[in-house]
Image (cartoon, rainbow, N blue to C red):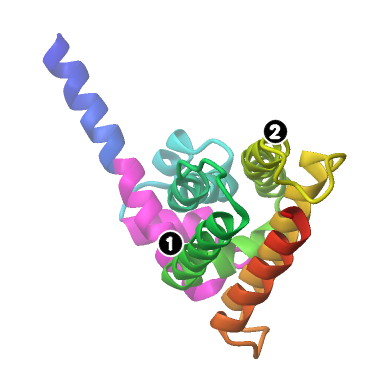
Amino acid sequence: MDKKIDQRTARAESYKRKVLESAKELFIEHGFKETTIMMIANNADIGYGTAYNHFPNGKDEILLMIMEEIMEDFHQVANNAYTVESKENAFIFIKKNIENLISLVLFHKKLLVVLHEAIHFSELVREKWEDISQRLIVRIAINVEQAKAKNLARNPNYDPQIVAGVLFYVTENYLWNIALDKTTKSNEIIVRNITEMYTNGLYK
């Protein structure tokens, strides 16, 4: 009995993986809006019903799972252990984090273009992106709170959520611009300006 369950589970995971890989190819080639669940199923060489059985919310749900895989890399950067010791130390840490984020954007560029499109067409994807954004802001806010607690903040009355939001949304804007080829600024200039703006604005 257990062996049969294991086989069913393995088969289900195999189908899911086929669907995800098929969807990645088609999303990149045709974009989110033009790709259909039928196209994904045919490309994966599985039945239309099988695809919907594993992803009841259709291509929106498929992209959400792809998003989770991509964002895991970004969360690893955001969750790097960090103890504020000085403004200089913070500068080095923040600069490295932004450089790492840009590297990830370049690595996942094609799928991020799809994600950007989907945010405008899918309520499910848009809600998920807003949730991810808020989680990242909360994580950044912890560093702001550390700076305040150690009397390193330029203004002791800074609101951690607002300051974290400033860093997140400025950085997010430029990361999207890089992914969408909408900026002529070099990555080095982007990193330097965001890092200096944040550290000089937050730290004494």
Q: Which mark is residue 149?
A: 2
The x, y position of residue 152, in whole percent, is 70, 45
Vertical position of residue 83 compared to residue 7: above or below: below
The residue at the far bottom in this view is 184
- Towards the viewer: 80 or 112: 80
Q: Is residue 191 left or right of residue 68?
A: right
Q: Does residue 121 appear in the picture of this structure? A: no
Is 118 left, or right, of 15 in this rendering? right
User: Would residue 128 be counted in the magenta stretch?
Assistant: no
**Residue 17 placed where, x, y %?**
32, 46
Residue in view at x 43 percent, y 43 percent: 51
- Magenta span: 15-44
Q: Is residue 156 above or below residue 119?
A: above
Residue 144 in sight from this viewpoint:
yes
Asked whether 47 or 88 is in front, the reply is 88
Q: Which residue extends farthest left?
A: 3
In-image side of 51 versus 57 (left or right): left
- The residue that mark 1 highlights is 24
Tell me the residue at 17%/26% (across/down). Answer: 7
Give the quarter of the figure containing the N terminus.
top left
Label 2 SS: helix
Q: Quadrant of residue 179?
A: bottom right
Mark 1 or mark 2: which comes first in sequence?
A: 1
Q: Nearer the viewer, residue 20 or 46?
A: 20
Question: Residue placed farthest to the top in the image?
Answer: 1
Residue 83's x, y, as percent? Answer: 52, 40
Q: CA distance from mark 1 to mark 2?
A: 45 Å
| Helix, strand or loop: magenta stretch | helix
- 24 and 135: which one is in front? 135
